[in-house]
Image (cartoon, rainbow, N blue to C red):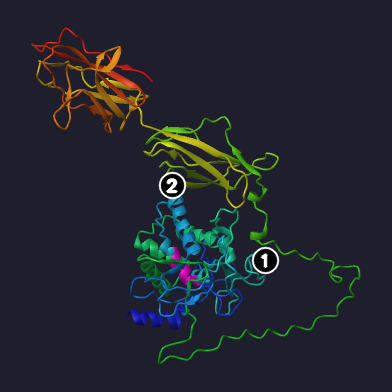
Amino acid sequence: MAAHFGRRLRKGAATTAVAAAAVAALSASQAPGATGVSGGAQAAGVSTPVPDTASDATGGSPYYTDLPPLHSPSPAPSSSPGTPVAQGDGEVAGQIPATVLDAYKRAEAELRSSKPGCNLPWQLLAAIGKVESGQARGGRVDADGTTIGRILGPQLDGNGFALIKDTDHGAYDGNASYDQAIGPMQFIPSTWAWAGRDGNGDGKADPNNVYDAALAAGHYLCRGDRDLSRDDDLRSAILSYNNSTDYLNLVLNWVSYYRKGVHTVPDGTGGLPTHRSDDTTTHPGTTSPSAPAKPSKPAKPSKPGKPTKPDPGSANGGDDRPTPKPPTPPWEQPTPSDTVDHLDYADPDAAEPTAMAGHAFSGKIAARAETEDGKAVAKVRVRFTITGDTDATFAGGEKVATVATDAKGVATAPALQAGEKTGDFKITTALVGHQVKGVTYDATVTPRAADALAPTDDKAHTCVPGGEFTDPVQVKATYKGAVADLVEASATLIKADDDPAENDKGPYFKDADDKPVRTLTGLKTDDKGLLTLPKLYADDTSGTYLLRITTTGGATLTVKLTVAPDGDASAEPSPSPSASS
């Protein structure tokens, strides 16, 4: 069955053409040797109108049909940097170039935050990237993730594909007559116009950038209320990208394969697919390979009328109409981040962030993007990074957060959460896509503390000489009225209320060797703020004694203990708690 499926893909997947009510098709890759090289089938948009002549979701466009091997990914063979290797029998099928893989995983992380109900797996993006462009032609991208040379599909001129006339004036695909699919995820311009995203934080959405394209594909797949952990929604999402059952099954195969593990390889050294849906190389009993189709001969133009005499003073040879200027490609246009001169504190008078271990920080961590003359810059991205030897994180457990500035130029970091490790750390800021001077916040995580202790009952603690105290001493710790959990404490039998030195007689605790001890350290309140002390014992000396409990933060409570022959302490009231900060 699997072999039959593979042959079917290699022979005729290009013949699958499904009618769509509203088409913003993402076209497939170009034929081998065409300008821009490589490519695959595209996602179809439904929100942006396209020319009425476009009536097919994919136009029969080709895509890579290589199936993953049956076994799990094996160790990747070595290759020289910058030298792509042919995939052949699938030995390097599990290879994904480092930058391309990072783009998929960053897109998954962003969707986990912005659309948590979608449950987008990065393996789905990797599978589509494999089928569409061979992982950006084996990872031929620069350090920022932009492809080295554009990846273009065939022009959608209706000749074997959908007919989609130019929608971008050639700004993206360089074709002012017909649209062509572009980039590692093969979006057509009309779909990119609404689906495009800025995935690398440089302030622009470029379909030729693998970070931008991967994030755009993730949002495209997560449209509506899709939950990609559900099989029906997963299949629906893939079919919305290319409405073909063969394409669906192929992508699902690669998703399953990548979930077993992948191998990261240097950029430019990833394996290249070898089979495409328009490949006529077949198995025995099928037709022989055919040469690439030649372009149709253009129609002979009609004989022009007699031209008018050009005006020597006219720059366009006598035509008085102004020559239209081609639009500047989006990736060459100035971006808002280019105007930022520096980052400043959003509130210069804000106190340094401080929080107890395990608690959220109060206040906000924010930076303001400004021009050289102090004007606010909106819609630029600021990266907040936690550095230092603590386990403090932003909400969600991340050490790095990227936030866009608002209309006032202010980017506010997610809520800062202290971990259990105390100490100082820093939050640094940086403008994404443009190096400018940032600001730094110094923050501190202090130990958990209590500012008040109170007994949990009003029982008197009494004992006969040489006996045991029946009721344990239990207290509750609070901080600003809230439960103070996991707060460290100590307990000491002291000589007098004004003399905190350890007493050498009277009640005592027992250590692990059953020896008397009158000071306990390393105590800690539970998750309800309660502290229950071990059992107390009395020596043979009668009298009234004091037990002092102290917590981190300075809360103290002194408890009276009575040792009397008759065990009667009714004449002595229970002590009142005392606290200090």
Q: Position of residue 45 (x, y in %)?
A: 52, 63
Q: Secondary structure at mark 2?
A: loop
Specify whether residue 449 is painted magenta.
Answer: no
Q: Secondary structure at mark 1?
A: loop
Crowding at label 1, few (<14), some or many (≥20) Cα neighbours within 10 Å? some
Q: Quadrant of the C terminus?
A: top left
Which residue shows up at 43% across the image and 69% down it?
95
Label 2 sits on what residue type?
Answer: Glu
Type of secondary structure dominating the magenta stretch: helix
Residue 242 in sight from this viewpoint: no
Q: Is residue 24 left or right of residue 579?
A: right
Q: Is residue 180 left or right of residue 395?
A: right
Task: Examine the rendered structure and indicate whether residue 472 appears above or below residue 419.
Answer: above
Q: Position of residue 202 (x, y in %)?
A: 59, 54
Along the line of sight, which residue is nearer the eye, 515 or 479?
Answer: 515
Q: Which residue is mark 1?
A: 169
Residue 76 in sight from this viewpoint: yes
In the rendered structure, find residue 279 and report the number of the disc placed on it.
Answer: none
Label 1 sits on what residue type?
Answer: His
The part of the image, by quadrant, that contains residue 68 is bottom left
The part of the image, by quadrant, that contains residue 254 is bottom left
Task: Examine the rendered structure and indicate whether residue 86 appears above or below residue 198.
Answer: below
In the rendered structure, find residue 398 and report the number of the disc placed on it.
Answer: 2
Along the line of sight, which residue is nearer the eye, 388 or 277?
Answer: 388
* Circle 2/circle 1 CB separation < 8 Å: no
Specify which label sits upstream in the sequence, 2 or 1. 1
Q: Quadrant of the N terminus?
A: bottom left
**What residue span does the magenta drawing correspond to?**
125-134
